[in-house]
Image (spheres, grey):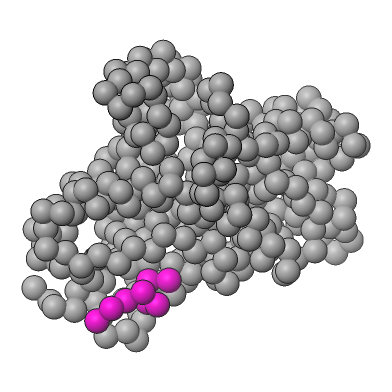
Amino acid sequence: MNKNLTAILLLNLGGPDSIQAVRPFLYNLFSDRQIIRLGPSFLQKPIAGFISFFRSKKTEKYYKLIGGKSPILEITQAQAKALEKALDKSEDNNEFKVFIGMRYWHPFIENVVSEINQNGIKKIIALSLYPQYSITTSGSSFTRLDEVSKKFDLRITKIESWNNHPLYIDALVDVIRKGLDSFFENVSSYSFSEIHVLFSAHSLPKKIIDAGDPYEKQTLETINEITKKINIQWHLSYQSRSGPVKWLEPSTEEKLKELSEKGVKNVLIVPISFVSDHIETLYEIDIFYKSLAKELGINMKRADSLNTHPLFIEALKDIVLKNTKS
């Protein structure tokens, strides 16, 4: 074993890798009490089974529209490969191997931590791929990491959020500029003022924010850093909500309707809380919201997800190196 070898563990949500995986993926998701509390704890899993059974058929239709599965694993694997290559080129004395741990589908965090331990690696830098921290996302992944790592002798450094990292902001500014450019054939004659930028973030139940979760605040901090570098007319809305509880507002659907009523004709949606394409971008934005926007008379486009954007990979590299402990 190389004593300088450090495991980088990229943590993400995961997604079904087939239509058959949709129902068990939803069951795993709804079984997590850090996302949603379904009655008393002893009823969490039975209720999760009930919900996943009834929601799976509808959700399967959405996945069929985007190729029959989530692409998030392949994208995260590409991010891991690019990050490991970037780290190999660094002048740091440490050596790194990048792993992927998913919360709700394969490869599960518990299996990957066991693999890291079996490889004789004792140092882990756990990096959440959610830029803005929430107990429901990064928090849940780190809770699971803590649970499964207790039986191993591991030194774990946790990176919980990086919502205003300069290179991450630069990467977002780059995809926003390219998205704005895409509205015009002659890019030398346009004005950004003709386009409204709608930052669409994953919604959360309002009670979670009221309890002190920093997600909303950190999302606004990210947007504030972006607007220091690019002059845009912007709005913030929230997507992917379900159930009868009060969620963060306005919804992206409501905001598109409001912008239409105000006469806005061009909207660039920026998926601000997502770094990888998955069902929330490929179906919810690219299909559902785009269809709605067309009905409303809005020419809607979406900024590319960061995926393996070079500046984004450099951001992850910088984050890792600054958190390396020899």
Residue 323 is covered by the magenta coloring: yes
Q: Residue at x 30, y 67 (%)?
A: 157
Q: Left or right: 186 with respect to 224?
A: right
* Label tally: 0
Q: Quadrant of residue 27 in the image?
A: top left
Residue 60 visible here: yes
The N terminus appears in which quarter of the rendering? bottom left
Vertical placement of 252 versus 97: above or below? above
Q: Residue at x 46, y 22 (%)?
A: 59
Give percent across and percent down for residue 200: 64, 44
Nearest the eye: 195 or 3? 3
Which stretch appears magenta? 319-326
Vertical placement of 54 versus 118: above or below? above
Give percent across and percent down for residue 219: 60, 54
Vertical placement of 293 versus 131: above or below? above
Q: Left or right: 166 with respect to 144?
A: right
Residue 284 visible here: no
The C terminus appears in which quarter of the rendering? bottom left
Give percent across and percent down for residue 305: 56, 51
Residue 263 is covered by the magenta coloring: no
Vertical placement of 228 versus 279: above or below? below
Q: Residue at x 36, y 34 (%)?
A: 33
Nearest the eye: 308 or 251? 251
Q: Left or right: 59 with respect to 23?
A: right
Q: Residue at x 87, y 51 (%)?
A: 194
Q: Quadrant of residue 79 in the image?
A: bottom left
Give percent across and percent down for residue 37: 40, 29
